[in-house]
Image (cartoon, rainbow, N blue to C red):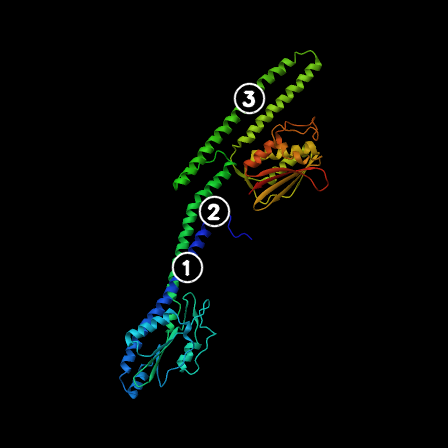
Amino acid sequence: MKLLPDSLWGRLFLLLLSALVAAQLISATLHLRDRGKALMYASGFNSALRIAGLVQVLDPLPKGQRQRIVTALDLPPLRLQLRDRPQEFPDNSHESARAELFHQMLHLRLGRERPVQVYIPAVSSGVGRYSDTESEPQDLPDAMQQLMGHHRTMMGMHTPANFGFIVQAELQGGEWITFTYSLPEELSDWPWDLLAALVVLLLAVVVVSFVAVRWMTRPLSQLAVAADELGKDIQRAPLQEKGPTEVRRAARAFNTMQARLSRFVEERTRILAAISHDLKTPITRMRLRLEKVSDSVVRDKLERDLSEMQILVQGSLDFMRGMALREKTQRLDINALLESLRDDAQDMGQSVRIRGTAAAPYLGKPLALKRCFVNLIENAIRYGREAEIEVRDSEAELQIVITDKGPGLPDDTLEKVFEPFYRIEASRNPKTGGTGLGLSIARNIARGHGGELRLENSAEDGEGLRAVLTLPR
């Protein structure tokens, strides 16, 4: 399974999205952790001040009055209870710097001579819960038992949602007061407003990144389309040179390359066409002078040479026309075109059959495609006695397969036969052979339409050659 998209746009967007999500998660985690620490320290500091103040208020009062004040002030999150003796806590060897700081704050307000005990339930690493291995005091008030037995973890804050502590201080007369603090539920809940703001920010950045990456990579897509279209029409309109500096430079370089290629092809085509055209005149003069040759044997030999020269000249002109492909593109009925070519062949006593139909018209150059089909059909009839045309149509491509009943070709020559003027005399009858340009012209026309032409030996009965013409829809 592929994890990375194929397109540059997709990879850039995935990279930015991953980085943004990771940054937001790290930011949220750090914020929630700092928030949890701030809540713990703030609640501890404020509670220490309040506890010290209550001890100072209750210390000089008689026991009866103390109980009334304790009953009135016994409200969450700080619960109060008077005891005749202090409660026993588990081993405090695990106490953290937070508990020590709490001790220091109480000693500063109450004096170091006053007996004070602080118990903060430990939080085990990794899960954020109180340690299950610690022994809990059994003879404690219900609120204290609930504090140590009921707790849950707030993810990312590294602090228990019901974080709390127990403080015991001795009053005058030997009476002890117990303070049990539990972090209020509303303070330990997830900060949904903050999380919603982070999500909105993330979505906004994702949308902006999507638009920005799309906008930045669009010129590259246009450049790729232009490069693909260049093979079909070298005279296509040049790219617009706009956008960032790098994009403008790439478009300018592409337009320069297209102009140079166009001039090179035009000059080569014009020179070869002119040479082929100019050769017609001396060939015609030689034919006229050949009539004056009295030796019939010499005259026949010269006649054959002149005929071959004329065929080569005409083939070269046809090849140059196939390279030009200056015909306008229009919607073409492939079925009607193939049927007309079949009827023409049958009128000449040749065997041509058609299987399958094109589901829709094809957008192409009619004369060029007709020349391509004619070359393939004539090639099949010349070397394979008959031609069978199969039309395969789909949404993506139109495929024309022309099969003959000839001897086929060696596998190592299936590509060589597309070279101009290349012929295989051993496997093709030289008496009926052409110029060796028919397949070259046909492939040039196919590639000019963005398609491809290939040859393959028939594997059904061991004989015959199959020409597969693929044209994109």
Question: What residue appears at the point 30 percent right and 87 percent down from the top-left corner?
Answer: 63
- Name the front one of labels 3 and 2: 2
In percent of width and height, residue 87 lies at 39, 82
> Which three-letter amino acid code belongs to the residue tagged 2?
Leu
Question: What residue appears at the point 42 percent right and 48 percent down from the top-left corner?
Answer: 213
Residue located beneath label 1 in the image = 26
> Which three-letter amino acid code belongs to the residue tagged 1?
Ile
Check disc 3: other Cα within 10 Å, few if <14, some if 14-19, many if 20+: some
Check disc 1: other Cα within 10 Å, few if <14, some if 14-19, many if 20+: few
Quick one: SS at disc 2?
Answer: helix
> Which three-letter amino acid code belongs to the residue tagged 3?
Ile
Quick one: SS at disc 1?
Answer: helix
Residue 8, which numbered label?
2
Residue located beneath label 3 in the image = 275
Q: Do the residues labelled 1 and 3 touch (CB within 8 Å)?
A: no
Above-or-below relation of 189 to 292: below
Q: In which quarter of the image is residue 450?
A: top right
Residue 64, which numbered label?
none
In percent of width and height, residue 93 lies at 42, 73
Q: Is residue 440 left or right of residue 457?
A: left
How far apart marks 1 and 3 lie (CA) works out to 74 Å
- Name the front one of labels 1 and 2: 1
